[in-house]
Amino acid sequence: MDNDTLPDWGRIVDTHAERVLRVALRVLGNAQDAEDASQEAFAEAFRLQQRGRVQNWTGLLIRLATLRSLDALRRRRHSQGLREEDWISRQEPFENAAAQELAQRLRHAISRLPEQQAAVFAMCHFEHLSRAEICASLGISSEAAATALYKARQRLQEQLAAIQQGDSR
């Protein structure tokens, strides 16, 4: 590639950094992990643009942020240290604990989904993307996105019901 075809990387990062971080944060629920996943997404996008012209930066970066966040979610260990947001709460202790536990269970269940189902679910429910935006980001048909979302919801419902049933015993 010559210099005339190289994208303005600074502008790309400035334009998309906030959204990429927001996607990662919604999937991971932890600012430090989200920053790491965001950096991985931008690094991967940089490598991809060196191999060929990127047609849709927004779609590529959302897809990479979602996938890297899901990877981090899958790698996450069961035990985590106390995070800053755990120190200070504006909610009652029980409400905060219940919300944290539910979010943790949902993230764990999402991490067990197949990659495409997890990505479609995260883009739909965490980033509130339209089906057309999801299809463009993932390079899949509308039917494939609808099927993946349906299967993801079914699997999550089954996993969360099984967890809840185990808790009630």
Image (spheres, helix red, strand yellow):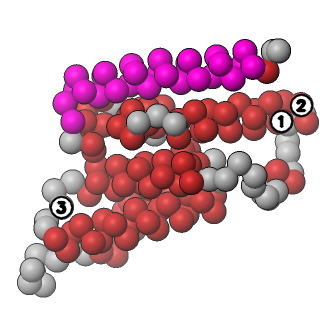
Which residue is label 2 attached to? 94
> Residue, x 16% and y 56% (percent of image)?
55
Residue 130 relative to residue 132: left or right: right
User: In terms of secondary structure, what is the magenta stretch mainly?
Assistant: helix
> Residue, x 34% and y 66% (percent of image)?
44
The residue under label 3 is which amino acid type? Val
Magenta span: 140-166
Few, some or many C-alpha atoms within 10 Å of disc 2 (few <14, some 14-19, many ≥20)? few
Few, some or many C-alpha atoms within 10 Å of disc 3 (few <14, some 14-19, many ≥20)? some
> Residue, x 62% and y 53% (percent of image)?
76
The residue under label 1 is which amino acid type? Ala
Instruction: Answer above or below: position of 76 versus 98.
Output: below
Q: Quadrant of the C terminus?
A: top right
Q: Secondary structure at mark 3?
A: loop
**CB under 8 Å between callouts 2 and 1?**
yes
Query: Which x, y percent locates residue 104?
Result: 68, 38
Q: Which mark is residue 9?
A: none
Which residue is label 1 attached to? 97
Instruction: Answer above or below: position of 81 versus 105.
Output: below
Few, some or many C-alpha atoms within 10 Å of disc 1 (few <14, some 14-19, many ≥20)? few
Q: Nearer the viewer, residue 24 or 79?
A: 79
Q: Which mark is residue 54?
A: 3
Answer with the quarter of the image where residue 46 lies. bottom left
